[in-house]
Image: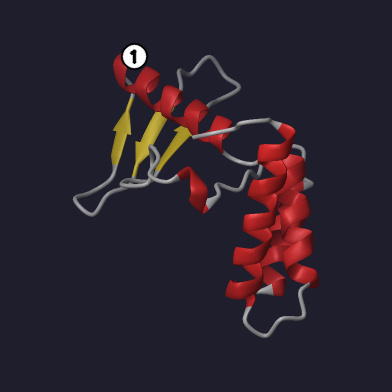
Amino acid sequence: MRNQFNRMAELAALSNVTVQVVLFSLGAYAGLKNAFTLLQFISPQSPVVFVESTAGDLYLERYGDLARHEESLERLRAGALDPDSSVRLFKRLRRSSNPDPSQQYKEILRRTLLAQRRVHGAWRR
């Protein structure tokens, strides 16, 4: 697990990568049922949504499809930890000497959520 946390922290340091952790407390969210990737290009090519599913993969290019998935992605970003908090979480988890990382992870997430509520007042999702 430590190697995975190290790798996530390394990737988050790249200028073209944004890593945000979605806490369990967020509950069900868009993208949970089917993974999707919003592909954006430097060229004049329009964005494309790549949807993975057990029935097959889809590439969506219609405006309505793009708008719906962009909105889902923005809601997911808004509900997730910010990038700096996500990296701090990875660093705390990798320093853990607990042989059962799932217990340590749950405790850190609980503390993070409590701290987030203190910072944002009566924060609710």
* Left/right of residue 109 with respect to residue 39 in the rendered view: right
Q: Residue at x 53, y 34 (%)?
A: 124
Q: Tell me residue 18's x, y (percent).
A: 67, 40
Three-letter code for the amino acid on which mark 1 is drawn: Tyr
* Quadrant in the rendering for residue 115: top right
Q: Residue at x 77, y 42 (%)?
A: 84
Q: Quadrant of the N terminus?
A: bottom right
Between 102 and 35, which is closer to the camera in this rendering?
Answer: 102
Between 19 and 51, which is closer to the camera in this rendering?
Answer: 19
Residue lying farthest bottom?
99
Q: Secondary structure at mark 1?
A: helix
Mark yes or no: residue 56 visible: yes
From what the image shows, is residue 62 above or below residue 16?
Answer: above
Mark yes or no: residue 16 visible: no
From what the image shows, is residue 16 above or below residue 89?
Answer: above
Q: Residue at x 38, y 41 (%)?
A: 31
